[in-house]
Amino acid sequence: MRYIERYHPKEGDGHNKILVITGVPAVGKDYLLSESKRLGMIPPSVRSFSFGEELFVFLRTLYPQVKTRDDIRTLLSQDVIRAAVEGIIFRMIQAQPSMLNTHVVYRQKDSIVTNPDLDKRIHPHSYLFVWSEPDQIAKWRSLDTSRTRPTESVTNIALHQDIALEVVSVVARHTGASLKTVWNRADNTQENLVLIQEKVHEITL
């Protein structure tokens, strides 16, 4: 699973020049992307979208009761959220080449949820799945005070991560996108930054 390229994109299939970076919460996606930008490893021509942040900023301007990202799914209807999501997808496609930092599989209350129709509309060139040891993810979550997340055991984190990877694998196969996994550890940041730079370069060709 670590550093495995499962699929190559189908040629001539009209993919958007979009790289989707995904993984379970607190696996290190945000950190790797922020470091890539700080070090100038992402070309200025590539627009970066954080789906959760884009959604939060947009909905907060319309609904003052939304104070945190966690309020979106607890206070707003699915129809409102869906309309906002469609707008973000449209802007992202218009801005390509672009990167999308998102959860293809996410927790919603006590369920694990996915929406493959969104991925079909995004129709990305490739997926980069960030993976880490479950106990390391649990440690990173305990240090992150910016979000309120349900407490998960290391065993449940491992299960959630395995489910997420398999779902992303199925989505990539059915949409004809490439999929590569990144093993994220505290001691291999530079190696992963170079890998992200290479994947970003692919969507600029």
Image: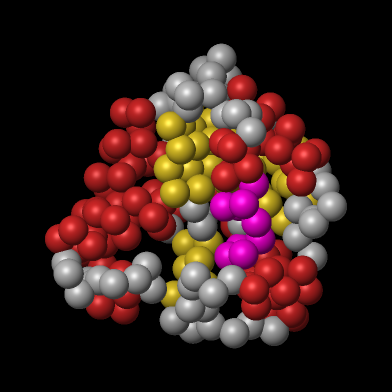
Name above or below for residue 192 compared with residue 102: above
Q: Residue at x 31, y 78 (%)?
A: 74
* Left or right: 196 as drawn, with respect to 42: right
* Left or right: 55 as drawn, with respect to 50: left
Q: Residue at x 82, y 47 (%)?
A: 188
Q: Residue 97 appears at what percent x and percent y?
A: 45, 26
What scheme was used to colour the molecule?
secondary structure
Q: Residue 168 appears at what percent x and percent y?
A: 60, 52
- In the rendered image, the residue lying farthest to the front is 38
* Left or right: 1 as drawn, with respect to 125: right
Name above or below for residue 67 compared with residue 184: below
State the extent of the magenta-drawn residues as a range: 24-32
Name above or below for residue 115 compared with residue 14: below
Is 119 within the magenta? no
Which is more toward the observer, 21 or 14? 21
Is 31 within the magenta? yes
Viewport quadrant of the C terminus: top right
- In the rendered image, the residue lying farthest to the top is 205
Q: Residue at x 45, y 22 (%)?
A: 45
Q: Residue 164 appears at what percent x and percent y?
A: 62, 61
Q: Residue 120 appears at what percent x and percent y?
A: 42, 42
Name above or below for residue 149 compared with residue 136: below
Asked if residue 199 can be seen in this view, the reply is no
Where residue 125 sits, quadrant-wise, is top right
Asked if residue 103 can be seen in this view, the reply is yes
Which is more toward the observer, 86 or 176? 86
* Left or right: 82 as drawn, with respect to 137: left
Q: Residue at x 79, y 65 (%)?
A: 133
Number of labelled discs?
0
